Image (spheres, rainbow, N blue to C red):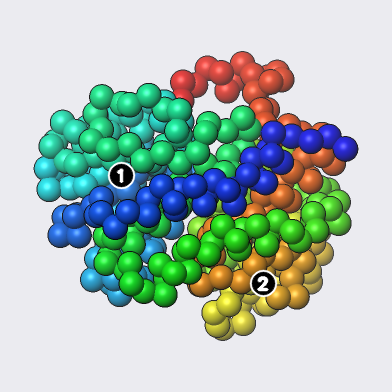
Amino acid sequence: MHYFALDEQIASQPAAVQAVLQRLASPSKLLDPARPLILVGIGTSYHACRVAAYWVDALSQGKQCARVYSAHEFALSIPVSAEDQVVVVSHRGTKTYPLKALERAHQAGAYTIIVTSEETPPPPSVDLILPTCPGERSSTHTVSYLSALAVLATLVTHYTNATKTSWYSALQRIPEAIEQTLQFPAPVTVAEQLAHCYPILVAGYGIDAITAEEAALKLKEGTYIWAEGFELENVLHGPPAAFHEKLGALCITSALDDGGRMQELYHEVKELGGTAFTCGTQEADLLFAPVEQLLRPFVAIVPLQRLVAEIARICQSNPDTIHIDVEPWKTAMGRVTL
């Protein structure tokens, strides 16, 4: 069996998240709760920002909010002032638009933080660097996502004054939950069936909808199969017109009442000839450990990351290079400076 750097990065996640939580265990506040918060990222880092914004809204019961922007949009057109606190999330801290976003915020007088690799040299336009983990060897990023979530969870905890809540206690147990999730059998059987599907749909409800989009990105990067992530209700409004017998679907089942919609989606895919699987904490095809509802992004993504590695082995794709090692992708993708 061929192993990828991706496999090692996935396995390293419990220790990486634990290291972040220990490093940021100090009660000092890194953000001012009275000042506006802006979260900026691209791709997987953008998904991490969206999760953090969801946390801010939920933990403050709607009294606080965080604005979330793509680094490209923020760097070019989003208003920013000296009152703002701007957190940029970037795997390696070297990409063009995350750095431009920091520079623009710095020039406006905003307080700037970058959440990035331990190996990133200090950018000139940043007030604080919060490290995640060593740089990943696989371009299908996994551990830098979960360790970034751990950094953001700590920031959000202090921003919303949630240090004495059950959320904070549950956050400290997340490394163990990730480890438990990794102990479930590898999703080989599911991979064998989805490897022949095209495209693959991933659906989630509530905070799981962000996980669905992150999983779809990993599938594209690692398997070269087109995948799309959806919020549950939106996937039922229109997209079924394009369902067919080669469609694959991954349904992230919620611990919350979704009005029976995920079950309806599952059966609709099957009725139209597609292949559907569930991902959840009970009686699911892909299992992850049960955790506090808001913390599900830490564990729900893990079986889906492992699924990418298994499909890649079957399809003989390379999640470590994401297709830039062969032509014509090497030339076409190489023309774009990221």
Number of labels in the image equals 2
Closer to the camera in the image, 120 or 83: 120
Mark pair 2, 1: CA separation: 32 Å
- Identify the residue shown where x is 66% and y is 28%: 321
Q: Does residue 37 show up?
A: no
Identify the element where label 1 is drawn: strand
The quarter of the picture where residue 304 lies is: bottom right
Q: Quadrant of residue 254?
A: bottom right
Name the residue at 78% across, 45% down: 311
- As drawn, the label of residue 154 is none
The amino acid marked with disc number 1 is: Val
Residue 312: where, in percent of width, then height? 77, 40
Q: For residue 309, which quarter of the picture? A: top right
> What is the crowding at mark 1: few (fewer than 14 residues within 10 Å), some, or many (at least 20)?
many
Q: Is residue 45 visible?
A: yes
- In the shown orientation, is residue 212 left or right of residue 154? right
Give x and y (percent) for residue 59. 34, 70
Residue drawn at (52%, 17%) of the image? 335
Report the side of 277 relative to 125 (left or right): right
Please name whichever residue, 238 or 111, is drawn nearer the observer in this view of the structure.
111
Q: Is 15 placed above or below 177 here? A: above
Residue 186 in the figure: left or right of residue 96: right
Q: Measured from the top left, where is residue 273 in percent x and y?
A: 81, 64
Q: Quadrant of the N terminus?
A: top right
- The amino acid type found where label 2 is placed reads Thr
Q: Which residue is mark 1?
A: 87
Q: Earlier in the sequence, mark 2 or mark 1?
A: 1
In front here: 64 or 246?
64
- Label 2's element? loop
Q: Which residue is mark 2?
A: 281
The spot of residue 36 in percent (x, y) is: 19, 54
Q: Tag 2: Cα neighbours inside 10 Å, few (<14), some, or many (≥20)?
A: many
